[in-house]
Image (cartoon, coloured by chain):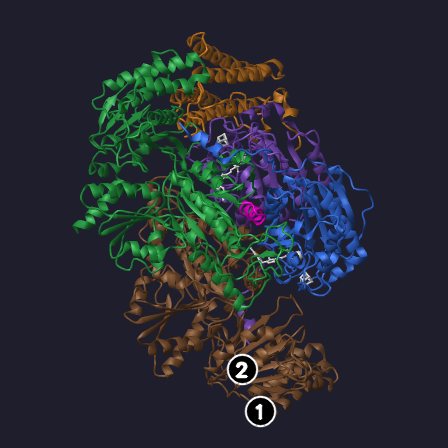
Chain colours: A blue, B purple, C brown, D green, E orange
Amino acid sequence: MNEQATIKRKASDYKSEVKPVWCPGCGDYHVLLALTRMLAASGTPPEDVAVISGIGCSSRIPAYTNCYGFHGVHGRALALGTGLKIARPDLTVLVMSGDGDGFSIGGNHFLHACRRNVDLTYVVMDNQVYGMTKGQPSPTTDPEWDSALAPGGTGIRPFHPLVIALASGANFVARAFSGQPNETARILHEAVMHPGFSFVQVLSPCVTFRPEQAEWKSQVHPAPVEPTDDPARAARRIMTDDGFNIGILYRGDRPVLTARATRDPAPVETLERSFAT
Amino acid sequence: MNEQATIKRKASDYKSEVKPVWCPGCGDYHVLLALTRMLAASGTPPEDVAVISGIGCSSRIPAYTNCYGFHGVHGRALALGTGLKIARPDLTVLVMSGDGDGFSIGGNHFLHACRRNVDLTYVVMDNQVYGMTKGQPSPTTDPEWDSALAPGGTGIRPFHPLVIALASGANFVARAFSGQPNETARILHEAVMHPGFSFVQVLSPCVTFRPEQAEWKSQVHPAPVEPTDDPARAARRIMTDDGFNIGILYRGDRPVLTARATRDPAPVETLERSFAT
Amino acid sequence: MGRQDDPAAFAATRGRDEDSVSLAILGSGGAGALTTGGLLLEAAARRGLYGMMTRSVGPQIRGGEAAAFLRLATRPVECMADRFDAVVAIDWRRADRFADEIALDAGSLLIGDPGKPGEGTRAGTEAPPPPALTRSGAAVVNVALSDLAATVPGGRENMVALGLAAGLIGLTAEELDGLIERRIGPKGADAVAASRAACALGLDEAGKLPRRFPLPLPADPRGQRWRITGNEATGLGAVEGGVRFAAAYPITPATEVLEWLAPALRKVGGVLVQAEDELASINMIIGASFGGVPAITATSGPGLALMIESLGLAVASEVPIVVVDVMRGGPSTGIPTKSEQSDLNIATLGCHGDAPHLVLAPLSVGDCRFTAGWAVHLAETLQCPAVLLSDQFLGQSSAVIAPPDPAVFATQRKTLPRTIEGYRRYELTQDCISPMALPGTAGGQYTADGLTHAESGLPSSKAGDHRNQLDKRQRKLLEAEYGSLWAEVEGEGDTVLLCWGSLTGAAREAAARLAAAGRPVRLVALRLIAPLKAEALAEVIGDRRVLVVEQTHSGQFLNYLRSAGLLAGAPRSLRRPGPLPIRPGEIEAAVMEWSQS
Amino acid sequence: MGRQDDPAAFAATRGRDEDSVSLAILGSGGAGALTTGGLLLEAAARRGLYGMMTRSVGPQIRGGEAAAFLRLATRPVECMADRFDAVVAIDWRRADRFADEIALDAGSLLIGDPGKPGEGTRAGTEAPPPPALTRSGAAVVNVALSDLAATVPGGRENMVALGLAAGLIGLTAEELDGLIERRIGPKGADAVAASRAACALGLDEAGKLPRRFPLPLPADPRGQRWRITGNEATGLGAVEGGVRFAAAYPITPATEVLEWLAPALRKVGGVLVQAEDELASINMIIGASFGGVPAITATSGPGLALMIESLGLAVASEVPIVVVDVMRGGPSTGIPTKSEQSDLNIATLGCHGDAPHLVLAPLSVGDCRFTAGWAVHLAETLQCPAVLLSDQFLGQSSAVIAPPDPAVFATQRKTLPRTIEGYRRYELTQDCISPMALPGTAGGQYTADGLTHAESGLPSSKAGDHRNQLDKRQRKLLEAEYGSLWAEVEGEGDTVLLCWGSLTGAAREAAARLAAAGRPVRLVALRLIAPLKAEALAEVIGDRRVLVVEQTHSGQFLNYLRSAGLLAGAPRSLRRPGPLPIRPGEIEAAVMEWSQS
Amino acid sequence: MTETVEDRTDIAADIESVPELLAHALRIEEDAEERYLSLAEQMETHHNHEIARLFRWFAGHEAEHAQEIRERMACMPLPDIKPWDYKWQGAESPEAVDYAEVRYTISVREALELALAAEKRAFDFFGRIAAVAKDPEMRRWAAEFAEEEAEHVRLVEKEIARLGPEAPAPVEDPDPPNEPL
Ligand SMILES: Cc1ncc(C[n+]2csc(CCOP(=O)(O)OP(=O)(O)O)c2C)c(N)n1
Ligand SMILES: Cc1ncc(C[n+]2csc(CCOP(=O)(O)OP(=O)(O)O)c2C)c(N)n1
Ligand code: SF4
Ligand code: SF4
Ligand SMILES: [Mg+2]
Ligand SMILES: [Mg+2]
């Protein structure tokens, strides 16, 4: 279905008519921008792209694109995307989710998707808060952050998505910042091109519940070193960085899990044989 | 409830009358032995100990002890144990599970229990297979292992529990081998004594579905170096070891999550005040 | 489109309610409609009036269009009225979005700023409110709120609107001044002065309106008033019932139960833990309760669905827990911000296997307090999970009421006081309640199990053990003492209005009107959904005909009642899924219509 | 203990079935009872007989006590008989554990090795079988299997037992020799010789038995026979129905569906993925099916509970999937290795919100093939999830049958063939099926959503959109064409035997006997559980009285039927939870008793 | 804290006093008894009754042995040693049969050979102390224990000899899990 891949496309070809209901200033606008720019640059026809999400402000993104989309239930986007990609290897599958959706309720699928290494791209728009349910701490939230549900802070160590991705076997690991849509587009592009499971954490501020994240703009900086292909080294680097290193941090070359479909399938009737006595 | 802690107890005081139905030769017998020896050595009265499990051969262990036990549903033992420990900090809580229970269906709770750092001990009896359901690959199974469900192997990278535990913030990380019950008892003892969330992976062979694991006996060896308190270093070590390093690999000193119960609770009536107009 | 979906057509058939006044305050993006509504509610409460406020917002997290719907009354009110007396629009911009929810008629007023017309209304040719509102025949009154506000330094439109709305219902400048002092005070004297001035302008404007709806003093003006939401009342009742542990995973519209519990539990020596998901939260409370600490969680449909497996574990292992389900529109993600009663099926019959458990439903915002407390009491004494079926309407409505009844019970879990020989956790006892040893009790050690077990708790696949434990768990619920609390039964008549949970308010109001109209009915509102008190229910129904009222699409409540062999003689069903509530007038009309047919 | 729990008391009231013979083969730890049973079944199949074998094992993973229950017959059989003609015990050691499951009477034989008495039987004073078996009055026959085996170098007791059992039912040495050649052949000539010799000894012993139960040749001895389990047949039917994607999380007793599918799908160009949990497996199949590939998963109660939230997603987003639930004893972990029909509630009403979907149940082991195929067909054409309610009995019984019918349908999902202007995924159409664009189709792009949506698929909280989509999803199921497949309706009489799923075999056998006894009944066995064909059902029931038969504790099926307003006139309920199956004789007796009363 | 099993492979020689030695001796017998009982239970649960009886018989022997030691040291306070602080040479007390060596289909010969190996390990343990201990009294005790173990070894060897030379064919499991139906 890629016969039209040579047609030149614009980012706007990948945007739907639907107006986002995100708060003005929300980082997710930039992510949408980066995504559509990336897709336009790749030239993949929109109908060959599927954007799969869970529930959250960030997870609203599929309907804002002109691709096929699935706005599933909370936390299960990766599983849904995995099934789709294995069944339809011809599609470009992007799973896009939030830090609550992806790391809290969806944590198990994250672990196992990294291991499984199906050729899809997982983008988590991390604002360190549950935006949609109005401001509760997420796994990536600072332990001191005060909120109604956790007055005085949770006191719990934040989840480190990149380290977990590496430890579980993701084949490509990167961090982006929504405020740099072109750089984010580039990273997403590399992620999509890289075979196997690619994980991109996009720092995407929530202006409404975490206005202090306006600071991120001045805190991010390019990763000081080249991406490595040694997961242990990458993990060490990431574990000790300041959380604002932007760039591709790891590229692995583990074999990609494919459906191992038989080249010449047998007719269904042959299955009956084993039952005859 | 510890007033009797000075009474000298024997391992058999911690065993119930119930005869295990494990296959003779199963590593889990040794784990039970190690557990009861450890408890006897600690002197904690059996009624002050709770052993919480999920579903699987390994998860049958609570009823074989003379402690309070909960044989819950598949994959949720850690959540149940967490609730119990937070509500009843006076108890010694051990959560004991299998590699399927703990790393496949229960993976998310593992991640978040490590982060949360409640003072309990998590023991996973890892036989790299689903024993109870008769021999399917688990997350720790070798990708080449042939089985009915995955003919020719899963082709999927095994899950690395110790690395994940470290990456998610476990405060104590160790590996034991069931065939060394005294060493296992020692490691469990240290795990229980260590404040916060302690994770012990016990290699515990399944003679029935993985008879080749009889080899483990000759493959295990003591960890060649001292435990570290640097998670990045510990992770690097573990990522590159052969999977048969036995011993305590990491001891952290992150603050333990406690209930933060108020010292002098207010009477319930005071809660009404905020509603008056 | 049926009459039910057309609020204007519907409202036209209803009269004004003399004891109450209903207002909608609208505004878009940051106009302050909700704040205005809240202040008005508070002012009314201070005067000793009763009232209720619900709200409706766009899909935006903030800055979207918003509506505050208020009903203020001289007597207690438990539902919104059939129609609105007036709409006060700070702007008309997205007022069309709320048209479904605002029933108006020719007696209603549409008051708003002509400078901020509805989207798509053609300036000059049309009135500023959107046609969806004007076609009701309601009178349009233009008040240039923003021009007025501009005349006061620091003045804001919503304060003018507050004054206007206050004047409309007969509140005085003094009452508003006090309110502003309390609420704006912390922002400094200038702010207070600006607000007062703006408000006064609004009050003045009210004087010029073609119509007003002043409320007299209530019967008991000195009576104490609480301003409380159902979600808060649920938290309060639970803590009063003895809950000291909660596990939380946020979800609309249940989050406020959890957010209320977090500090409250801490105050009284308990604790709330945020879980990674609902699978964890229900297991955490099972763990805490196994340890002897009464425990709760709150969620909505999607979360309840995730808890179902472990709800069955609590049934089988006989661990008391309370799971609050604040229902929203379903299925799946559905309509998170709107009410529906469509989790009845999953709450009662959602478990695999035969897993009888308690299902309760509060009958009003205030009753959330009582029913939550009762749920804790029943769960603890019966060693059984209880699902409390609240809903978005009850949970998120802000009610001004007399302090509601707490549930006062001598709640005592039947525990093992001391060591006994040969203790069996799941012993078959006379009352079907097996004494439960709490960890720490020497000699009481046992392993709780979700596997079919013998009395000892050890796994068993014997037919006798399976049946004995199934029998015991069913009988302990069926034979428990629920007194008359299982339902509210009110009034006499040849027809029974049969409802449950949050629809009670509307049904009760319909019953009152029908009685007043000389067509009395009997109201039966179920608080205890499961076990169903089928015999008692059959008795209070007698040979009356039955109108079953519920907010579902498929008639879940009707089907549930029929599944128990009830309602054999052709009951009628008045039902509708969310998001629109079923109004008292619709119920009244259904009864009248039946009478005529 | 009622008669139902006391198999001996029960069997005493039943006669022998002339067309079939029923044997139990027992043994403990590695005695080879299951292998022996399997060989016997195969020998019978080779002769052209029909048959069925179930098994029962201790809680040990291996080496525990085991029983093979066989029924071999000259005509097709779909359930086990009321009683056993003989028990052949390789040893009697834990035979007591199976006593519940083995109904015997004075006409039965207890044949076994006297040197291996039951645990606790006092040597010398008591017969070697445990009292739980002997008190039936069955004749005890001692055959020193182990001594006999010892006379053959390399001879084994279970081979002697095989010969004995074969002789008992009239199989010949030639038949056994051929079997042994095929099965033992790979182990070498010595092993074959030893087995044959041991077997021959057993056959000799059979000649000395006080009684034998030789089966004649079947009516169609040359007919083809399949040996198949319900789990295998389910897999086969699904693949034939078009499934090419499966996601798997193992669980007893559903694992074999998945283990059968793994290599089978690969062969025909499909794929099975092992998921990390059931939440993942259902979402994986939703994803695959969204991509256009018909998809399935199989689980049991606990797994279905975990899938419930996403089952609702498939309903709301209208993605066809098939979820097989091979039911086991519940609630919670329950009795994983035993059958029960108690997931009816969760399967039909387990979702939150109003979430109508398909629920189907195969009516026999062979029918698993057809019903699985039909489930795929209906799911695909109706764009709706289908739950297939099989159970442990159907799933794990090994049946010898004529090749069962496949489901042959022109299954075609209504997809969007090419670009159209203004495509709306959830369009309201005449037949309520909205054309579904598959990814890759240009111009068909849409976002599938679990939020309440407009026809376009975009989220909406409008009352009209909510209701329209709810209506559409309900109506597409209600108005679909199910032909006569929704139930098997057989026979005439003043009483209806109403059952579903795996109980059909027993009910059908009861009906046949009642007819033979001059007391004919009508059998109605539901294959389509939801949507319930209430009108058609009411019609086939007519004014007959109804006996509802089911294997649950609370009467889930009865309640489900009543919830639809059916069975108003006092139906009777014959029900029992697992683990013991409901036998044909019990159903027969219940009808007879009713007739007399 | 961080020493591991391997570090201790040769630490039997580190036993420093008679009470410590006796504590080890007692533990050895108690562990062996406990292990045989547990194995017997396993065999009963899995219906290998012949071997169950054999294990019970061994357990009885070990119990007697333990009782003897207890009586002999009645007035001697023994040190309280944590399970992991015993100075065995292997992972476990030497006379305990390794759980991992046992299958439910185990034959008499295999069971006896396991017991023999266990007795030999115990003999080696005491023999080594008898050889290297500095304290003469320790040597005397150790030698005595070693002799008792030697006695056991002979006993078991005799039993094995009685089985005759030909090795019985390994018993296979005719009801393996996942046996297709
Ligand atoms: C099963 C379930 N539990 C809870 C919710 C409520 N919920 C919706 S979104 C959300 C969190 C979203 O956080 P995140 O993924 O970080 O997205 P954000 O809104 O911050 O972009 C939650 C808890 C739900 N919809 N379903
Ligand atoms: C929700 C649910 N899914 C699946 C199962 C079936 N099941 C029982 S145990 C088990 C796996 C056990 O594996 P593991 O935890 O490694 O334990 P082992 O038996 O190997 O000790 C599974 C899949 C279940 N009981 N519940
Ligand atoms: S609440 Fe936060 S995350 Fe959600 S749309 Fe607004 S800014 Fe974005
Ligand atoms: S199947 Fe494996 S894990 Fe289970 S009891 Fe047997 S040996 Fe142990
Ligand atoms: Mg977020
Ligand atoms: Mg395992």
Q: In what element is the residue under mark 2?
A: loop
Q: Which residue is mark 2?
A: C136
First in sequence: mark 2 or mark 1?
Answer: 2
Label 2 is placed on what type of residue?
Answer: Ser
Q: Quadrant of residue C55?
A: bottom right
Seen at 51% across and 70% down, the residue is: C580
User: What whole-number distance in Å separates the C-alpha atoms at marks 2 and 1?
Assistant: 17 Å
Q: Position of residue C176 (x, y in %)?
A: 62, 85
Q: Quadrant of residue B153?
A: top right
Q: Residue furthest right?
A: A224
Chain holding disc 2: C
Seen at 40% across and 81% down, the residue is: C513
Q: Is residue C8 left or right of residue C423?
A: right
Label 1 is placed on what type of residue?
Answer: Pro
Highlighted magenta segment, given as a residue range: D281-293
- Evaluate whether residue C282 shows in this view: yes
Main secondary structure type of the part rendered in magenta: helix
Is residue D284 part of the magenta span, yes or no?
yes
Mark 2 nearby-residue class (10 Å; few <14, some 14–19, many ≥20): many
Frontmost of labels 2 and 1 is 2
Q: Position of residue C258 (x, y in %)?
A: 56, 61
Residue D172 is tagged as none
**Picture quarter with ligand 3:** bottom right
